[in-house]
Image (cartoon, rainbow, N blue to C red):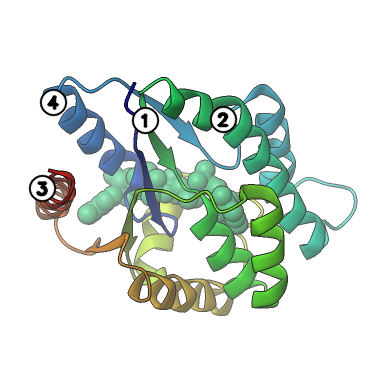
Amino acid sequence: MTQGKFIVIEGMEGAGKSSAISVITEYLAEKDIAFKQTREPGGTPLAEQLRTIVKSAKHDEQLTQETELLLMYASRSQLLANVIQPALSEGDWVIGDRHDLSSRAYQGGGRGIDDQIMETIANVTLKGFKPDLTLYLDIEPQIGLARARARGELDRIELEQIDFFERVHKKYQSLANADDTIVTVDASQEMPKVHQDIRQALDNFFESMA
Ligand code: Z5A
């Protein structure tokens, strides 16, 4: 059986990941490709509990940045072993709402955790596993945050100051520019144009596999 492919959608809050995922699911359905959807942090019963911890702004004690980092990778380890790899082995495709690039951007860029430490933890957890294609929705933090705020209550990370999100954004852009499996989509455009660009990136990906 042919191994499935892992496609990840990435970007800052309010970038439009939710509707981008619908575009990808429609595209795969049109091609009769079976797929599973995941999200990070989360995606397994245990990883969803870790998600609740990292997103809650209501803890009685401060979550240290090291704890935050390790919880992100603990969640990812559970998801990879229990959902992503089994699905890919069965020939299903997997569409991920965030993956390792989020940790590199938020914990590496935003929190300022050293690249070498990030690399070591990623290697221990993922053992070289990486997505076949990542679609990075690029948005200026101010625009994305305004969209996210208009939607409702903010989580613990969304309550960070703007300079934190500027660092996350910068890191996302530099990592995306350095990796040809990551396609940057301008998420500040009108939604139909964003969706057209996503479909174009998927067309290119399928052509590259042919
Ligand atoms: N995190 C981390 O720190 N490290 C990690 O390793 C991982 C995650 C994996 C997870 O939250 C949090 O954990 C996240 C990063 C961190 N926190 N922060 N901050 P999440 O993934 O559950 O939530 P999110 O990233 O905050 O998702 P979101 O805000 O739901 O983003 P979105 O899915 O991209 O947004 P959306 O719902 O698709 O769009 C937001 C609104 O904008 C909505 O009303 C849309 O209709 C509107 N929108 C979208 N696109 C457009 C365009 N093009 N024009 C106009 N309006 C638009």
Of callouts 3 and 1, the N-terminal one: 1
Which one is in front, 161 or 116? Answer: 116
**Disc 3 target residue:** 207
Of callouts 2 and 3, the N-terminal one: 2
Tell me how far mark 3 sits from mark 1, CA to CA. Answer: 17 Å
**Disc 1 target residue:** 3
Tell me how far mark 4 sits from mark 1, CA to CA. Answer: 16 Å
Amino acid tagged 2: Gly
Q: Assign a secondary structure to mark 2.
A: loop
Q: Nearer the viewer, mark 3 or mark 4?
A: 3
Q: Assign a secondary structure to mark 1.
A: loop
Quarter where residue 146 is shown: bottom left
Q: Nearer the viewer, mark 4 or mark 1?
A: 1
Q: Residues within 10 Å of mark 1 (few under 14, many from 20)?
A: some
Is 88 positioned to the left or the right of 62 in the image? left
Q: In this rendering, does residue 150 appear at all? A: no
Residues at circles 3 and 1 in contact by the CB criterion of under 8 Å: no
Is 4 rendered above or below residue 165? above
Residue 144: x, y in percent?
38, 61
Q: Which mark is residue 184?
A: none
Q: Nearer the viewer, mark 1 or mark 2?
A: 1
Amino acid tagged 4: Lys
**Disc 4 target residue:** 31
Amino acid tagged 1: Gln
Q: Residue at x 14, y 56 (%)?
A: 190
**Disc 2 target residue:** 43
Tell me how far mark 2 sits from mark 3, CA to CA. Answer: 30 Å
Q: Residue at x 27, y 43 (%)?
A: 20
